[in-house]
Image (spheres, rainbow, N blue to C red):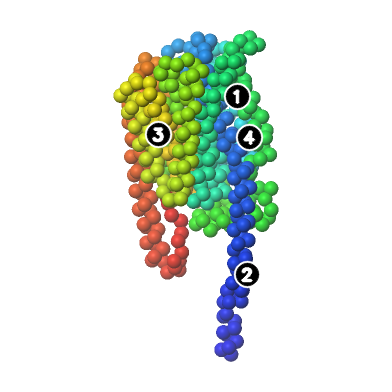
Amino acid sequence: MSALDDSKTTSSSDKVPPSTLGHATCARDDLERRILRKLDLRMSIIVVIFTLNYIDRSNVSNARLQGFEQDLHLQGQQYATILSILFVGYIIMQVPANMFLYWLGRPSIFLPSCMLVWGAISALTGITKSYAGAVLARFFLGFAEGPFYPGSLFLISQWYKRDELALRVALVSCGIPISNAFGSLIASGILQGMQGKLGQAAWRWLFYVEGSITMFVAICAMFILPDFPHNTRWLSPEERALAVSRLAEDGDSRAELWNKTSMQGLRDAVSDWKVWWFTAAYTVQLLSQSFAAYFPTLSGTMGYNTTVTLLLCAPPWVLSTIAAFALSRYSDKKQKRFVYYAASNGITVLGFIISVCTMNTAARYFSLFLMAQVYAGYMVFWGWVNNTFAGEPAKRAVAVAMINALGSIGNITGSYVWQSQWGPTYRYSYAVCIATISVSTGMLGVMHLHLKRLNNRIAREERDNEALGNTVGFRYL
């Protein structure tokens, strides 16, 4: 009888040859790598979309150098209002749009549709004849652009594990510095070569051309973007099951199929103080980054003509893109967020200080390179946010949208920081940026310490709970 009992209690691992287990593990790893290759290839379209998103948003800054203000007879703070009004529509749309995206479950349709609309609005901005028309166009442009960034962040957070996330967020967000670099190059060509064509000012052609490119890419994106792991049609059933299970093994509940409504996600996000803390820090951070909207103007203080001024804008953003990629990858490797965010902000502050202290052409141009590094920390920040709310998808969808939407109040305020009468030194503007970036870094330092305490508490609970044994659960980064 005891022999029979022993045979019954023989472990399954004794019955399965080690070679078979090894082959199964290798096959799973190969399949996972194949899924990631497919996914990365398709997700790369988001970089193109995001680049066009920022080009369409910031082309008014380039148009300003070639008669935009004069042709529309802008006075006083009207140009700053045209910049800031975009973020009013932007703020309004983000939370409801991400809730709708969660409900719809088809980002491959929703996000390109929004892109098609904003591309059309951007192109139509070129026909405006007055300040009122420009304000309306910019408001509805923000309304259409609002869903894209939080929606794309939510999409990638539903596919990648925690140690893969910051790098992918960086790759997607590289559209910001890329748009600043190549947007300036494209604008320099259009503004130089299209003046007077078909009786239109060159700055109007800038809107026509860039808006049309956006609409074309939007149509292509409908056939490229994935949906979510459980409903993407171009995955095989085996690939789909692994895409879901690998998230469950990552120590969070993303793979537990979506059992909460959008309204429950809204309540969860609103009741979590961490969402509001990130939002406040992000608001003042965006205020400190307001220099980016005036980058051609700051480049223009060096005294060159329009074409050279725009060409000089590109190299700082190219370096920023490389630095952001490297920093985000290292952040993923080391599983740390705050220290790299703080380092990026420190380099940016150094750039501000140099610009405050001198009008020397070489020094001010060098300071532009340092200031542009702020986007490395910006990308690490969004990887950190997605890691922190790696719980229910419904809550994360709302949290990401809330932080990005309400934080954009910093963009609205920042549009009025760079007043013409403060130029060409803009010392007061730089002082505001130094103060706000310091506040943001301090606030996120407090969040970092809080999350460390939570990790210590989780570790103690696991040690006290014998049922968990040596299992390592979720940890904040």
Q: Which mark is residue 285?
A: 3
The amino acid type found where label 4 is placed reads Pro
Q: Position of residue 400 (x, y in %)?
A: 49, 41
Q: Secondary structure at mark 3?
A: helix
The amino acid type found where label 1 is placed reads Glu
The amino acid type found where label 2 is placed reads Thr
Left or right of 275? Residue 185 is right
Residue at 51% from the left image edge and 42% from the top image edge:
169
**218 up-or-down from 39: above or below:** above
CA distance for labels 4 and 3: 28 Å
CA distance for labels 2 and 4: 45 Å
Residue at 47% from the left image edge and 46% from the top image edge:
329
Q: Position of residue 64 (x, y in %)?
A: 50, 16
Residue at 43% from the left image edge and 51% from the top image edge:
334
For residue 14, which quarter of the picture?
bottom right
Q: Are circles 4 and 3 on residues that touch, CB within 8 Å? A: no
For residue 368, which quarter of the picture?
top left
**104 up-or-down from 117: above or below:** below
* Residue hosting label 2: 20
Left or right of 104? Residue 396 is left
CA distance for labels 2 and 3: 53 Å
CA distance for labels 2 and 1: 56 Å
Q: Give whichever of discs 2 and 1 has the lower sequence position.
A: 2
